[in-house]
């Protein structure tokens, strides 16, 4: 596998040689797949690296976090939920005035309030990934209707759906191949994993043009959105308890348990360490921090479903 390297999205801390959280999540997943006897191909590894950038972009854009996750609500003293609720209030007013609100509006509004539920995280991730699409690729917004969950998936038509890449910015964890996901593993039926819409490169360019228009339109009512948020804050708004979730890992438990067993077996120690060092190098670790980075990959690989594990967002 060729060196995936560091990129402009990595934090200043990582330029000193220490992996950022998103780089560590990517590396731990690549390591876990190797330890599970299913090493990721070079092409999939590159796609996962690009998806990791999309996840970071999305989480940074929605910088007040998730409006329905207890950890984010507590860290922001309810503001993540108030911002999402404010967007709903303003959207309802716009609908009552006769406005037609499409997907581009949803993305622009989430970016404006800098927060969202799982659905908004999925919509923003879809649009953030469009510039990375290659010929034959599609970025989908996926829904699990019975579980009331949504996320983004990178797919290639004709390729098995288990090879799709899950980009779930709301969940805990980095991008993964669908066969390893809590909502996307092999035993999930098609009616529990529904594509709501999809863009290839050409349609994606049109979607981004539409998004720019929606951003410009919403800039004219930003004061109204902030006023709605302030009123909700003054009234002590907090989402109903039945609508609040705990942080949820993206990776399904069976895979995580198998890898944990591999990490805990002392007979595998030399192999595991060698693999962690190799993957840390492929991710661009300098030699002076190689052992530290390799150790961090092993620690996370041994507990793939740990929560919380995502980096703190800028305003959380």
Image: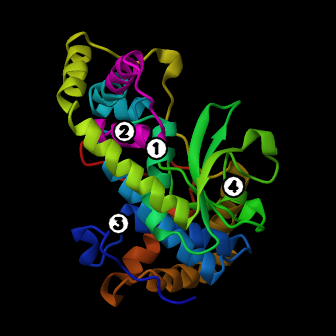
Q: Position of residue 253 (x, y in %)?
A: 68, 49
Left or right of 8 in this view: 279:
right
Q: Secondary structure at mark 4?
A: helix
First in sequence: mark 3 vs mark 2: 3
Image location of residue 286, percent across then percent down: 34, 87
* Label 1 or label 3, whichever comes before in sequence order: 3
- Which residue position holds label 1? 121
Residue 110, numbered circle: 2
Q: Are marks 2 and 1 in contact (CB under 8 Å)?
A: yes
Q: Main secondary structure of the magenta part?
A: helix
The residue identified by callout 4 is 257
- Which of label 2 and label 1 is nearer to you? 2
Q: How is the image coloured?
A: rainbow
Q: Please provide the residue range marked out in magenta.
A: 86-115
Disc 2 element: helix
Could you tell me which residue is drawn at 61 percent across and 53 percent down?
Answer: 198
Residue 46 rendering spot, x and y as whole percentages? 54, 77
Does label 2 or label 1 sit earlier along the sequence? 2
Q: Residue furthest top?
A: 235
Q: Is residue 62 visible?
A: no
- Tell me if residue 102 is in the magenta stretch: yes
In depth, the one of 226 and 311 nearer the eye is 226
Q: Is residue 139 above or below residue 9?
A: above
Residue at the disc numbered 3 = 20
Q: Dot 1, crowdedness within 10 Å: few (<14), some or many (≥20)?
A: many
Q: CA distance from mark 2 to mark 4?
A: 35 Å
Could you give the CA–CA distance between mark 2 and mark 1, rounded to whole angstroms?
A: 8 Å
Would you say 258 lies left or right of 26 here? right
């Amino acid at each position: 596998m060729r060196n995936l390297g560091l990129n402009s999205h990595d934090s200043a801390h990582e330029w000193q040689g220490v992996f950022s959280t998103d780089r560590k999540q990517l590396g731990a997943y690549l390591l876990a797949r190797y330890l599970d006897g299913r090493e990721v191909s070079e092409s999939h590894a590159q796609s996962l690296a690009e998806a990791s950038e999309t996840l970071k972009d999305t989480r940074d854009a929605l910088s007040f976090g998730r409006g329905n996750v207890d950890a984010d609500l507590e860290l922001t003293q309810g503001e993540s939920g108030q911002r999402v609720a404010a967007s709903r209030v303003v959207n309802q007013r716009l609908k009552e005035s006769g406005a037609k609100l499409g997907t581009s509006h949803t993305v622009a509004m989430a970016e404006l309030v800098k927060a969202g539920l799982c659905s908004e995280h999925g919509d923003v991730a879809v649009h953030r990934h469009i510039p990375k699409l290659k010929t034959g690729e599609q970025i989908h917004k996926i829904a699990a209707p019975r579980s009331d969950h949504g996320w983004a998936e990178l797919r290639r038509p004709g390729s098995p759906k288990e090879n799709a890449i899950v980009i779930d910015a709301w969940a805990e964890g980095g991008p993964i191949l669908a066969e390893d996901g809590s909502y996307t593993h092999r035993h999930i039926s098609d009616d529990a994993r529904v594509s709501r819409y999809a863009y290839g490169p050409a349609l994606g360019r049109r979607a981004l043009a539409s998004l720019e228009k929606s951003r410009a339109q919403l800039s004219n009512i930003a004061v109204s959105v902030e006023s709605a948020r302030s009123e909700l804050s003054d009234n002590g708004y907090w989402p109903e308890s039945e609508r609040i979730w705990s942080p949820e890992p993206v990776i399904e438990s069976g895979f995580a348990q198998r890898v944990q067993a591999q990490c805990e077996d002392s007979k595998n120690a030399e192999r595991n360490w060698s693999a962690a060092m190799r993957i840390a190098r492929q991710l661009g670790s300098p030699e002076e921090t190689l052992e530290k980075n390799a150790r961090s990959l092993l620690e996370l690989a041994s507990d793939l479903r740990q929560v919380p594990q995502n980096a703190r967002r800028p305003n959380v």
